[in-house]
């Protein structure tokens, strides 16, 4: 058996109950085959793939907190510190009832390669809890965040592991966690990113992931002789990534016409109105039925279906495996020509294969949504030098990083005879830097 097949079999056996983690590993290892084949002897002897697929450590802990009725609630907290070959562990905290170890491991694994692609010195990690912030009072969210950080603070630090936001963790949660970290450790340091502007946050971090998706799509289209101006875009999700992807799409002259949440989706033929969407989701924290009340031409549909809308470009920005084979078929049939993943692993393996085989320009999440973590790394730099940069400075660095990522993955794909396969390109380019650092640092 080839080295890749050996390791895949081992990972499948050891992690059989974690389908999302296996999916992420399979995608990466399959596309690394040409690199591994070219270096098989060294990599096998050094057990590079076994080491990269096994987290440095996985923390799992009890998070007890008291609800508004005086009842004690218990959630499970996680932090997976996956790989710090090129920098301190870095990655978000997901708060969602679906969270279990397999979700955090898949996200942490993806983060290794994504963070490497940014060109900045950050390793891969991820954390979170099965706590659901939806429907909780601010006091309950604070109680949870304080309890979560009471344990997590023992394992993180500005030069050790720097968590940030993800699904369910926004500015409010980061603020509560930062306050608790400071209170317990006495340290005022850049231990979290996505902080508020009054206490060390970076301008443009809130917008960065969504803006970054559009910057890389713009570059991908340009390099393929196309223009984003005037294109219709279908976007899923209605959270941080989706909102700012929508905003930047408008700014670049495209027309984003959809958004969605876990209950249903909206089609707005006049183009999604960002101010209304922000009011519904960021201020009222309400369902999308509220959006259509304010926009009479818009339609609300229960359940899934956002990918049935006719569009030129599709940007899945909600969650894993939300774009499946049937959705991919509908997109192709409707003339869509580009897909970029704002979310982490939103496209199933079969759907990705179908899209690529049908000539769709497909930009994978570890490249397309890397603008968020890249700007987090810029927040870390500003914290270290105790300065803050202007919005324009951060935004222009972000643009440069996204354009650079695209060319790195384009070049890596070409070097291995896989021109236009940006999934392979992203995995190869991300892997090369990490493996170089691992080999240089010896067996660890
Ligand atoms: P938010 O919590 O701000 O928004 C998530 C959105 O996705 C909400 O509209 C939510 O709907 C929807 N959603 C979540 N889970 C599901 C589900 N199971 N089914 C259907 N819809 C769902 O999160 P973000 O926007 O920050 O994150 C979105 C994606 O982007 C995630 O995959 C995240 O890992 C990824 N990402 C985020 C980055 C960031 O900087 N925030 C950086 C890079 C990637 P509802 O409110 O109904 O749950
Ligand atoms: O998936 C991701 O890259 C994030 N949730 C952002 C991580 C970060 O550290 O900013």
Image: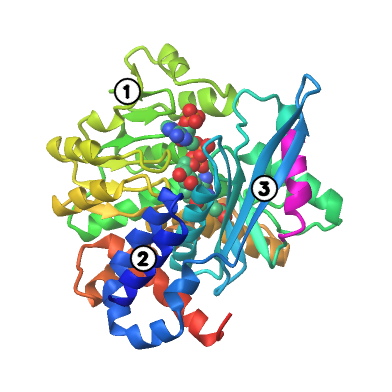
The 10 Å Cα crowd at callout 1, few under 14, some 14 to 19, many 20 or more, is many
C-alpha separation, residue under disc 1 versus residue under disc 3: 32 Å
Label placed on residue 216? none
- The segment highlighted magenta reads 142-156
Figure colour scheme: rainbow
The 10 Å Cα crowd at callout 2, few under 14, some 14 to 19, many 20 or more, is many
Q: Residue at x 27, y 47 (%)?
A: 339
Q: Which residue is mark 2?
A: 8
Residue 70 spot, x, y in % from top left: 81, 22
C-alpha separation, residue under disc 1 versus residue under disc 2: 44 Å
The first of marks 2 and 3 along the sequence is 2
Residue 157 spot, x, y in % from top left: 72, 62
Could you say whether the residue bearing mark 2 is in a helix, strand or loop? helix
Q: Can residue 407 be spotted in the picture?
A: no
The one of 211 and 66 positioned closer to us in this rendering = 66
Q: Which residue is mark 1?
A: 268
Location of residue 290 with respect to 140 vertically, above or below? above
Q: Residue at x 30, y 60 (%)?
A: 423
The one of 374 and 159 positioned closer to us in this rendering = 159
Q: Which residue is mark 3?
A: 195
Q: Quadrant of residue 443?
A: bottom right
Q: Is residue 153 on the magenta stretch?
A: yes
Q: Quadrant of residue 250?
A: top left
Callout 1 touching callout 2 (CB < 8 Å): no
The one of 199 and 73 positioned closer to us in this rendering = 73
The one of 393 and 289 positioned closer to us in this rendering = 289
């Amino acid at each position: 058996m080839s080295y890749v097949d050996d390791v895949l079999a081992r990972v499948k056996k050891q992690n059989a109950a974690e389908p999302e983690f296996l999916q992420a590993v399979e995608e990466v290892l399959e596309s690394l085959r040409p690199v591994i084949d070219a270096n098989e002897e060294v990599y096998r002897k050094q057990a590079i793939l076994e080491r990269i697929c096994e987290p440095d450590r996985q923390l799992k802990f009890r998070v007890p907190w008291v609800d508004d009725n005086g009842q004690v609630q218990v959630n499970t907290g996680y932090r997976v510190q996956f790989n710090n070959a090129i920098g301190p562990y870095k990655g978000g905290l997901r708060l969602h009832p679906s969270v279990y170890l397999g979700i955090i491991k898949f996200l942490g694994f993806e983060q290794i390669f994504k963070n490497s692609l940014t060109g900045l010195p950050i390793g891969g990690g991820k954390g979170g809890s099965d706590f659901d912030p939806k429907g909780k009072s601010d006091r309950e969210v604070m109680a949870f965040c304080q309890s979560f950080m009471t344990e997590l603070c023992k394992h993180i630090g500005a030069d050790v592991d720097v968590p940030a936001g993800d699904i369910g963790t926004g500015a409010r949660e980061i603020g509560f966690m930062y306050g608790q970290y400071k209170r317990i450790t006495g340290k005022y340091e850049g231990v979290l990113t996505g902080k508020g502007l009054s206490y060390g946050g970076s301008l443009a971090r809130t917008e960065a992931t969504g803006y970054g998706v559009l910057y890389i799509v713009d570059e991908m289209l340009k390099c393929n002789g196309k223009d984003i101006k005037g294109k219709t875009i279908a976007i899923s999700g209605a959270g941080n990534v989706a909102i700012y992807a929508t905003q930047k799409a408008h700014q670049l002259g495209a027309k984003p016409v959809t958004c969605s949440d876990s209950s249903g989706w909206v089609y707005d033929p006049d183009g999604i109105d960002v101010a209304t969407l922000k009011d519904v989701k960021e201020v009222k924290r309400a369902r999308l039925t509220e959006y259509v009340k304010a926009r009479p031409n818009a339609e609300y549909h229960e359940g899934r279906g956002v990918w049935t809308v006719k569009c030129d470009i599709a940007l899945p920005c909600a969650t894993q495996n939300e774009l499946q084979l049937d959705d991919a078929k509908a997109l192709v049939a409707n003339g869509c020509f580009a897909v970029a993943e704002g979310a982490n692993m939103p496209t199933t393996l079969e759907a990705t294969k179908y899209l690529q085989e049908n000539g769709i320009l497909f930009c994978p999440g570890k490249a397309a949504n890397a603008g968020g973590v890249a700007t987090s790394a810029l927040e870390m730099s500003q914290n270290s030098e105790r300065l803050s940069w202007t919005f324009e400075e951060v935004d222009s660095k972000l643009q440069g990083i996204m354009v650079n990522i695209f060319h790195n993955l384009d070049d890596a794909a070409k070097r291995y005879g896989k021109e236009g396969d940006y999934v392979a390109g992203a995995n190869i380019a991300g892997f090369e830097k990490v493996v170089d650092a691992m080999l240089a640092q010896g067996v660890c």
